[in-house]
Every structure is written in C-alpha cells, then in structure tokens.
Image (cartoon, grey):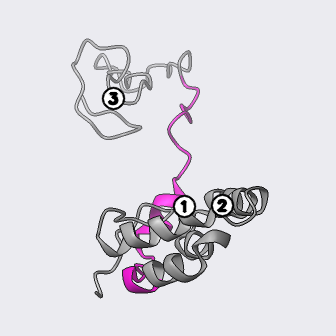
Amino acid sequence: MICSNCGNEIANDAKFCSVCGSPAPVQNSGAENAAPNYQNAAPNYQNAAPNYQNAANQYAAPKSRLLAGILGLLFGGIGVHNFYLGNTTRAVIQIVVTCVTCGIGAIWGFVEGILILCRQINTDGCGIPLKNDC
C-alpha cells in the first residue's frame, strides 16, 4: 500500500504509516458500494507545517568572509561583524561586555575577526557558508 499522507510504501497489514504516523488507507474488500470507514479519517497535520526558514536560506546570498573579518578587526568590540553575519544576540552581548569591561572586552571581537579571516568561522548566523573572497 501507499500512504496517502506522505507517499511512502507501507505494509498491507499495517494500521499506521511508519514514516509519518498517519492511518493506513482502508483496503476495499471487493464491494465498491460498501460504506466508507470514517473512524480514522482525521487528517494528520503533525508534520504539515512548512519550514520557511530553510527555504529562505537556500536562496540567500552568501556573506563576504573578507568584509566580516575586517569588520571584526576594526569594530569587533561593538559586534558589527556579528550584526553583519546575522548573529544579533552575540553582537549585543559583545557590546555589553565591551561597555562593562571599559573596552577590554573588544579583544573578543578582534579575535573573532582573525578567526573569520583564518577560516575557523565558516558560516553566518543562518548556517550559510561564507563566500571565500580572500
């Protein structure tokens, strides 16, 4: 049998699909005019929500490694490179750390700028690989 919800093949005696968990389609016993079985007719919407985040990431342009690294070296203390890469939470934390430590926390952003240029940090905030332009 074929699952009507996900299209995967399931065993003839199975009551539920092993992939999506929806009820198996009812097999006709040869009588075309038999009353339909609506006992398990409720649709399974458990996995029906589309994942728009991954779809958007698939078509997003990669960020520049060179620009992110230079922003980290010059303005790393205020997290400009992390804002550029989409790591907003980390960028705000870098601003707070730099302010609380009277500027000493800016070393964190400087080191991240070096790591970006040395290819130790390879993705942006959405998981898209950085463009190798340096």
Coordinates of residue 66 in the picture (x, y in percent): 38, 85
> Where 108 falls versus 22 (above or below)?
below
In the displayed structure, does residue 91 sit left or right of residue 53? right
Residue type pointed to by label 2: Gln
Residue 19 image label: 3
Q: Residue at x 39, y 67 (%)?
A: 128
Give the SS element for disc 3.
loop
Start-end of magenta stretch? 41-67
Coordinates of residue 38 in the picture (x, y in percent): 56, 21
Give the SS element for disc 1.
helix
Residue 94 image label: 2
Q: Earlier in the sequence, mark 3 or mark 1?
A: 3
Q: Which numbered disc, 2 or 1, marks the residue closer to the eye?
A: 1
Choose between 33 and 59: the one closer to the eye. 59
Q: Earlier in the sequence, mark 3 or mark 2?
A: 3
Choose between 120 and 45: the one closer to the eye. 120
Residue picked out by circle 1: 108
Q: Is residue 61 magenta?
A: yes
Label 3–label 2 contact, CB within 8 A: no
Q: Residue at x 70, y 62 (%)?
A: 98
Mark 2 and mark 1: span between their CA atoms?
A: 8 Å
